[in-house]
Amino acid sequence: MVKLKLLIGKERIASKISEIAAEINHDYREKDLVIVMVLKGAICFAADLIREITLPTDLQTVQCSSYGALGVNRGELKIFGLDSLDITNRDVLLLDDIFDSGHTLSALQEALWKKKPRSLKTLVLLSRPAPHLNEIRPDRSGFSIGSEFVVGYGLDYKERYRGLPGIHILEEE
């Protein structure tokens, strides 16, 4: 049996997204902004964020998969959609749901730099403090969280719970 405990409510998320969008509107004015969203986890974050951004914004996607059949143990990272990205000489904001070990963010940054963007910044909704594989950290994160396994607002457990309006700790009973 699974138990869900609310960690971050939808009102706090909405407030943080408004704050982040205001900074993006300021930082990227008069720039060619491309948001590269990491599917599927960042879908709710990206949808709410682009509604708050008042600048002309191009939204593109990549998909990463690194979890095995059980949904919690990391496997080999696979990145899909890199070939279709149009980011050369553009200002890219890489948007992901959670920064954990740094494995995904590091691999994505390396892959995106090969496409020769003018600039590349990273934004995650959630960030865990440790342990990280390397020195790479997101340029901006919405919330710092602990080591609990979280779901909701795009984050899943075995493809479930993405549609929850807040971030919840998933506990096994």
Image (cartoon, grey):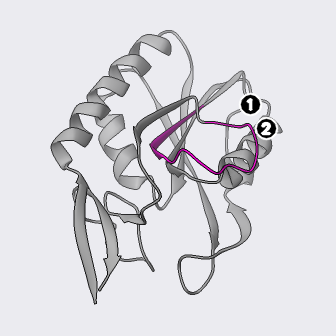
Q: Which range is magenta? A: 122-137
Check residue 23 for magenta coloring.
no
Say above or below: 122 vs 46.
above
Tag of residue 6 = none
Instruction: Look at the numbered discs 1 and 2 and tell me whether their residues touch, using CB distance below 8 Å.
Output: yes
Q: Residue 163: which quarter of the image? A: bottom left
Residue at 40%, 18% in the rendered image: 23
Residue 170 at what x, y percent from top left?
33, 71
Residue 30 at what x, y percent from top left?
51, 9
Say above or below: 12 vs 148.
above
Q: Quadrant of the N terminus?
A: bottom left
Residue at 31%, 62% in the rendered image: 152
Give the mark nearer the N terminus: 1 vs 2.
1
Check residue 124 for magenta coloring.
yes
Per the image, the residue denoted by label 2 is 115
Q: Secondary structure at mark 2?
A: loop
Residue 26 at what x, y percent from top left?
42, 11
Q: Residue 2: which quarter of the image? A: bottom left
Q: Residue 13: which quarter of the image? A: top left
Outermost bottom residue: 1
Crowdedness near tag 1: few (<14), some (14–19) or many (≥20) residues, C-alpha within 10 Å: some
Kind of residue sitting beneath label 2: Lys
Per the image, the residue denoted by label 1 is 88
